[in-house]
Image (cartoon, rainbow, N blue to C red):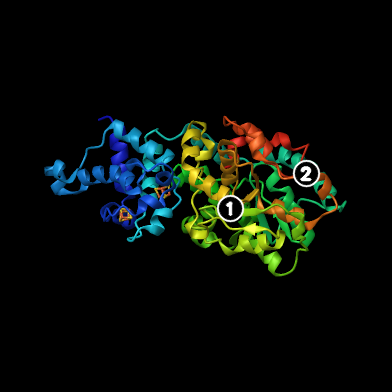
Amino acid sequence: MTTTKIDIALNLLNQQLNQPLTAALEVCARCGICAEACHYYVAEPKVEHIPAARAESLRKVYRSEHDLLSRLFPSWTGAERLTEEKLAEWADIAFNKCTLCYRCTINCPMGLDTPLLMTSLRAIATATGNAPEVLEMLADAAIEKGKDPEIYLGFYKESIKDMEVELQELTGNPDASIPLQKQGAKKLYVALAGAHTILPVAAIFETVGEDWTLSIFEAANYGIFLGDASRAKAIARRIVDEAKSLGVEEIVISECGHAYYVMRWVAPNWFGDEFTFRVRSIVEVLAEYVQDGKLKLDPSANSEPITYHDSCNLGRKGGILAEPRVVLQAVTNDFRELTPNREEAYCCGGGAGLVALPEAYDLRMMAGKPKADQVKRSGAQVVVAACENCRLQLGDLSGYYGLGIGVTALTDLVVKAMRLPGNQKTVEHIMTLETANSGEHDNAEVWGSTDLVSLPSTKGDRSEPKSNV
Ligand code: SF4
Ligand code: SF4
């Protein structure tokens, strides 16, 4: 007997039916409170943008499979059989119409986990061949690299050497270095693809005398966007094994929301006792340095009005809310909050892999309108986001809505406020993404222009644009 996509989908749904998923499928008061919590609905108040309405598509099939009354009298309960058309609809809902931001969950009186339902739909879409191809390619490329990292090591070492020259100029220390695979280092820093997530952090570590080493892997985990636990585990496994073999005390994740969330909150459940180290975001480490007085910072170095966008993965889902503000208060005299903020912050509209999908551009711009409005109201000229995904989306929003803002990482502001000897040469200005990204979305161009630290020799690194998500 041939196995159809419908069989695969229903089998997977059954396998996924643990207690939290079953609860999310069975319990919804249909009060509609979640509507105003979702940035899609706030941007465009349509029924299809209500979280509970999206979830209803899955619930209808669940009922037809698991509820006797629905089997006998489907029209009474609104139960529906699964079809190939519905599978395609699920893929669209899960990948394009929900950024897994969890704002609906924290505002639901029943704490209903709608994003868990959307993750289940992503898993089903992936298993039935309906997931966005680009996410699959990026996940597979990361796994492939983990199988034989030696192949990439020589090239990587060469890139690091170039970066070290930049680091020495920036810090004024001719001996400054970027340690790679250093046995017994305290911290294993896992960056994203591109020098812009390595050089500022290297300058900070160098200045405080940190005992650290750089990971040979990137922090991004596209398996999690696919709802594919086995691919997500394989990607995380590379970093866990590296941390174990080097004997580090902690893994420090670059300014990347989903990478932090996966390694800090998801991966420990997969690897259990193998987690002999802790996991922190670089944002937490920066806040610690500031609080311990390890960094001399001049807040007048960042004179423009600055605001902060809470990445959903770091803030609402990850609990990192106070730390970025500790750092921001130290690096600028004009920090202003967006309203609402912290755990109630709106998603920027580019999360959960959307920013990597060129076909999602129009949707992203629509769903990002509440964020664009917030930024406009704040009067800020610079928006800081401790997540690459968010920064790219904010840059796009600036171009689309004419915000005229600069978008930057927290580490870049810190390096500027450190007033290092090479600051004038290398950290001259905050690049206004609007000018680089006016109108149509061009990932390669955008990635090539988000670098606040001028790195002429490494700009070419952005040839892998989507791997920075
Ligand atoms: S707020 Fe919660 S209970 Fe109310 S409709 Fe939305 S998901 Fe259902
Ligand atoms: S998780 Fe976020 S994007 Fe998804 S339905 Fe809930 S509020 Fe909307």
Residue 441 shows which numbered tag? none
Place of residue 372 in the rendered image (x, y in percent of width and height, measured from the top left): 54, 45
Q: Quadrant of the C terminus?
A: top right
Up the image or down, 375 lies above or below 456; here it is below
Residue flagged by tag 2: what amino acid is it?
Met
Q: Quadrant of residue 182?
A: bottom right
Residue found 50% across the figure and 41% down from its top: 353
Up the image or down, 263 lies above or below 160; here it is below
Residue 32 visible from this viewpoint: yes
Ligand 2 within 8 angstroms of badge 2 C-beta: no
Ligand 2 within 8 angstroms of badge 1 C-beta: no
Place of residue 46 in the rendered image (x, y in percent of width and height, measured from the top left): 35, 41
Q: Nearer the viewer, residue 424 or 159?
A: 424
Q: Residues within 10 Å of mark 1 (few under 14, many from 20)?
A: some
Place of residue 282 in the rendered image (x, y in percent of width and height, measured from the top left): 64, 57
Residue flagged by tag 1: what amino acid is it?
Ser
Residue 378 shows which numbered tag? 1
Q: Which of the two marks, 1 or 2, is nearer to us in this view?
A: 1
Q: Earlier in the sequence, mark 1 or mark 2?
A: 2
Residue 163 shows which numbered tag? 2
User: What is the spatial separation of the Cα atoms under label 1 and label 2, in whole angstroms?
Assistant: 36 Å
Q: Report the side of 270 relative to 161 (left or right).
A: left
Label 1, secondary structure: give it.
helix
Place of residue 322 in the rendered image (x, y in percent of width and height, measured from the top left): 58, 64
Looking at the image, which residue sits at the far left? 72
Q: Residues within 10 Å of mark 2 (few under 14, many from 20)?
A: many
Residue found 38% across the figure and 46% down from its top: 118
Residue found 64% across the figure and 44% down from its top: 405
